[in-house]
Image (spheres, rainbow, N blue to C red):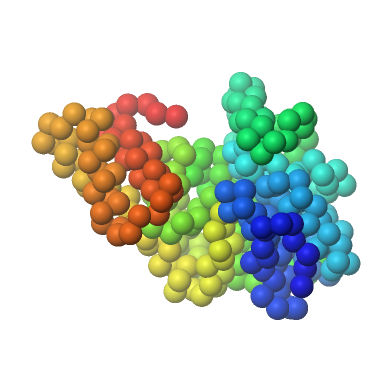
Amino acid sequence: MLPAPADARWLAPRDARDPFLVLQSPFWSYDSIALVADGEACLFDPGGRPEDVAALRDAVRARGALVRHVVLTHSHHDHLRGWDEFPEARLWLPAAAAAKPREHKQRDVAFQEVIDERLGRVGAARRFPDHAETFAERAAFTVGALEVELRFLPGHSLCTSVAFVPAERALVSADYLVSPGLPYCRWQPRAFEAAMVTLRAWCAELAIERVLPAHHAPIEGHAAVLAAIDAERAYFAFLRERVRALLAEGVEPALVTRRAAAEMRARRGPSLGARARQDGDNARRVVAEERGAALS
């Protein structure tokens, strides 16, 4: 049994042959993910708390592997953690993240500092990764005998990417499918919906059997993977239909947001607690799109 920090837990490996290591932290149920093969390792968004990063490193070492690659799937502040603990590794970042304006990068770092304060970790030096290898659409490298393919897929954010390990029929999905049926859109809903169409085609093409998201337990089985993607698409289809109908009735936009979010929660069934607040944010973004308003 791999050692884990207090109140964290290992979601993978499933068995001794499983090349993935996934440690879930109580910090927003954040999953620190490693792929290990033939004495080499790649870390995907290895952040979370410092103790989670250390536990992931120790688990990689226990398998006799060296960290050769670190992938940051996008530049949201929770995904920019831990990368600087592996200066010997090749660092990857989507070109859209590297090209963000300086003030946006500073904002990402500032959010990290706010979260550090909430975690009682004052004084940690934070910086935006400025030496990463970037990719516009796709990039590929190997971890031992396993090929890893990075694919740019904006939708959750303007700079999100995902990673495929075809030989394992696995997808590291970043902040897609973190709670199937409750999408986490932080950019434009239309772009998120388009991303789900693309992701479904990719998963069908590669016969993906396993999804490793950043804030959720792994999704196992090809049918379950496609069903999770379809749940995201159905969510926005319903939400957009309700927003359009309410706006057509002349309902004031702020009330449209509240009503559409409430109808979505009722449609989904039992409450997801604090996570259900995402319905309001999704509805607000759809309302803005339908009214032609800009919203970042």
Q: Residue at x 73, y 35 (%)?
A: 121
Q: Is residue 176 visible?
A: yes
Q: Is residue 95 above or below residue 40?
A: above
Give x and y (percent) for residue 225: 47, 68
User: Residue 200 versus residue 183: which sits nearer the camera?
Assistant: 183
Give the farthest residue toward the left.
249
Q: Residue at x 74, y 61 (%)?
A: 4
* Left or right for 138, reference 256: right
Count the numbered circles shown: 0
* Left or right for 88, reference 210: right
Q: Is residue 57 above or below residue 126?
A: below
Give x and y (percent) for residue 171: 59, 62
Q: Residue at x 60, y 71 (%)?
A: 169
Give x and y (percent) for residue 173: 56, 56
Q: Is residue 3 above or below residue 223?
A: above
Q: Residue at x 67, y 63 (%)?
A: 9
The quarter in which the C terminus is drawn is top left
Give x and y (percent) for residue 111: 61, 31
* Left or right for 206, reference 228: right
* Left or right for 154, reference 85: left
